[in-house]
Amino acid sequence: MPVTRGQRWTAARVKTFAKLWNSGTHPAAIAEVVGLLPRSVAVMAATLRRRGVDLAPRRRGPKGIVTSPERIKKFVSLWNSGASSRAIAAALGIRPGSVQSIGGRIKAVYGIDLKPRPRGPQSSKA
């Protein structure tokens, strides 16, 4: 349940918020645990930083894909196994046209090595 305006942040709530934030927990999950609205999590992080709480900077993940470790592992596994963009998109609920750019962003943001993919349509001539 969201916290009502004016309700105080105890040391325990601040500690819980900081632990979740620094571990990379999704803002919606943080909101649920500490009793905020999801859109208020980033604002609260900025407020706590101004008050001297040590919070890690958020790294923006690739757009179009939820950046949970499980989803990234699944993307990398499918990519490296040679799955088609359509198969990867279907497995992760994203658009097929965004698979290449997401692969590039995962490599750039997280430093995960992805196998090179062939460019263009592949013919199946035997």
Image (spheres, rainbow, N blue to C red):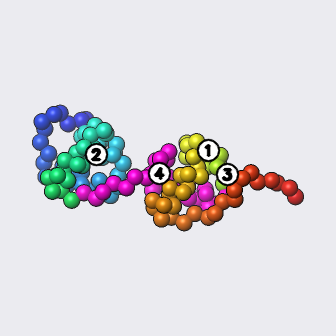
Cα distance, mark 4 to mark 2? 18 Å
Q: Residue at x 48, y 61 (%)?
A: 108
Q: Name the residue beneath numbered marker 3.
A: 84
Asked if residue 110 is positioned above or below residue 46 in the image, the reply reads: below
Q: Earlier in the sequence, mark 4 or mark 2?
A: 2
Q: Are marks 3 and 2 in contact (CB under 8 Å)?
A: no
Check disc 4 and report its element: helix, strand or loop.
loop
Name the residue type under label 1. Answer: Pro
Check disc 3 and report its element: helix, strand or loop.
loop
Q: Are marks 4 and 1 in contact (CB under 8 Å)?
A: no
Q: Are marks 3 and 4 in contact (CB under 8 Å)?
A: no
* Numbered range of the magenta stretch: 55-82
Asked if residue 35 is positioned above or below residue 15 in the image, the reply reads: above
Q: Earlier in the sequence, mark 3 or mark 4?
A: 4
Residue 24: x %, y % from top left: 35, 55
**Disc 3 or disc 4, which is closer to the eye?**
4
Q: Earlier in the sequence, mark 4 or mark 1?
A: 4
* Quarter of image, res 78: bottom right
Q: Residue at x 24, y 35 (%)?
A: 2
Q: Position of 70 compared to 43: left or right? A: right
* Quarter of image, res 124: bottom right
Q: Earlier in the sequence, mark 1 or mark 2?
A: 2
Label 4 Cα neighbours within 10 Å, binned few <14 / some 14-19 / many ≥20: some
Cα distance, mark 1 to mark 2? 30 Å
User: What mark, if any, has residue 76 been given in the picture?
Assistant: none
Residue 60: x %, y % from top left: 40, 52
Name the residue type under label 3. Answer: Ser
Q: Name the residue beneath numbered marker 4.
A: 62
Q: Name the residue beneath numbered marker 1.
A: 96
Label 2 Cα neighbours within 10 Å, binned few <14 / some 14-19 / many ≥20: some
